[in-house]
Image (cartoon, rainbow, N blue to C red):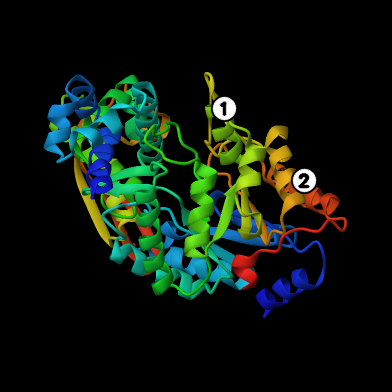
Amino acid sequence: MSLKEQQNLLARLYTDSDLREKFFAEPDKIGFDFNLTRREIAEIVEIAPQELDFFAESLFWKRLREAEKFIPLTVKILGCDFPPLFRQFSQTFNPQTVRKHLEDALEFCRFLQKGEVSEIALNVALFERTKIEFFGYGKRLAFCKLAFEIEPFLADNRTENLKRKQKFAVWIKLGNKTRHFYI
Amino acid sequence: MKENNRISKTEDQRPKTRIGLGFREPFRADIFLNQDKIDFLEITTDHYLDAKPEKIEELKLLKEHFPLVPHSLELSLGSAEGIDEDYLEKIAEIVEFVKPEWFSDHLCFTRSGGVKIGHLAPVPYTDESLKVFVRNISKVKKRISAPFILENITYLMQFPSSQMRESVFISKLLDETDCGMLLDVTNLYINARNFGFDWRRFLDEIPLERVVQLHFVGLHKHKNLLIDAHADKTQNEIWDVFGEVVKRCDLKGAILERDENFPPFNEILEEIETARNIISNEFEGTAKPVGAALHG
């Protein structure tokens, strides 16, 4: 059954940069944790580290590019902070459903709520997360409580002069028609 | 009825290789507007799993207007832990609904130990991997009766523990499973360039009579590596491989597989036309192996 254990380790190495670093520093220690023999560990160590790194990086960027399609406003407001934040997030979450990119986008918005991003960014992420829950998962009603009037940002992506004002963004499906409004 | 007419027409008139497109939502309107220029569509099964009613309606509509072939992404045929039965069941339902001439997935693994890798990962070409593929493919074939064809992937890393070349591995696998092959000519060219082997030798070593369908699209250059980003126009070097394959085997179909950086649709149609022209020009009485995997 060595291939199974090797694949368990490889799948983690491809998706977890911290583990990858530890493995190349102490391959035996990590390999034994995955129930591999010395020979099986050696077979993985023989893979050129730069090839493994490049493959893992390509997976990360592919994942990021797919997820960002669902949350364009969050990506826009985070700017250059988006890739490092998504990298942190990707270490903590592995999507399990067939709609993995949607799941990633949704969970990333949740992940942001725990981090240190601006309040406006949190509001934009909350807005998109609720929108994904409504459209992506076929809900008939979804709403979120916002601390800012974010309509100007939705219109022209400008964050200057956004007014602090509590509002609910609401999506509702009545028959085949969808309505979106603020209260 | 329209679907049947379309198929029988291509069977009666040569060249019979159909040229089509991987269906993507941004193409939807243009595909229907240019129905006469697209012989068939490849649908990504995963887009219709646990889908909203609108996607199911879309699938029904596509089925009414085009012959479809399903292409799945996550059977993970190379997973030593085995096939995900729930996923297989969902794929089976789609295939049974579409009733295609064949369906396909990849020669790779995509999950292990509860981790979904998120893309197609290579396996070492060993006897043990071969046994894993044979066991998993046998489960798929037991559940789904439509002919199953297997696609070669690109890889950015190689396993020094491999005991045989990729071409030998694929040949043994096709032989043992009696599957057809979906030969991605772009993937073949990219691997050959990145890892310094001769793609013509690869073609010499695989059973070309089992090649049923091709994938083609442009390659993407990243520093000194080539990548299958599915985002570029098909380049001349890929057309060279395409032409060589067409010369050497009798195909049922070829699909342009574009996923990113969508161009105006007339550029897509031009590529489809180029593929059609290459096949027409190559077809001049040359004896070719006939796709045993589908012709029985």
Q: Residues within 10 Å of mark 2 (few under 14, many from 20)?
A: some
Q: Is residue A111 left or right of residue B151?
A: left
Vertical relation: B257 (above or below) B199: below
Report in which chain the residue with disc 2 lies.
B
Q: Is residue B103 left or right of residue B235?
A: left
Q: Nearer the viewer, residue B291 or B113?
A: B291
Residue B18: image quadrant is bottom right
Q: Is residue A27 left or right of residue B260?
A: left
Residue B242: image quadrant is top right
Q: Is residue B113 visible?
A: yes
Residue pictured at 19% horizontal, 40% vertical: A110
Q: Amino acid at mark 2?
A: Thr
Task: Label 1: state its secondary structure.
Answer: loop
Residue at mark 2: B274
Q: Which mark is residue A5?
A: none
Q: Give the label, 1 or 2, closer to the camera.
A: 1
Q: Residue A89, how many percent across, how many down?
A: 22, 33
Residue B6: image quadrant is bottom right
Q: Nearer the viewer, residue B80 or B16?
A: B80
Q: Residue B276, how many percent across, how many down?
A: 77, 52
Q: Is residue B129 left or right of residue B253?
A: left
Report in which chain the residue with disc 1 lies.
B
Residue at mark 1: B196
Outermost right residue: B284
Q: Are marks 1 and 2 in contact (CB under 8 Å)?
A: no
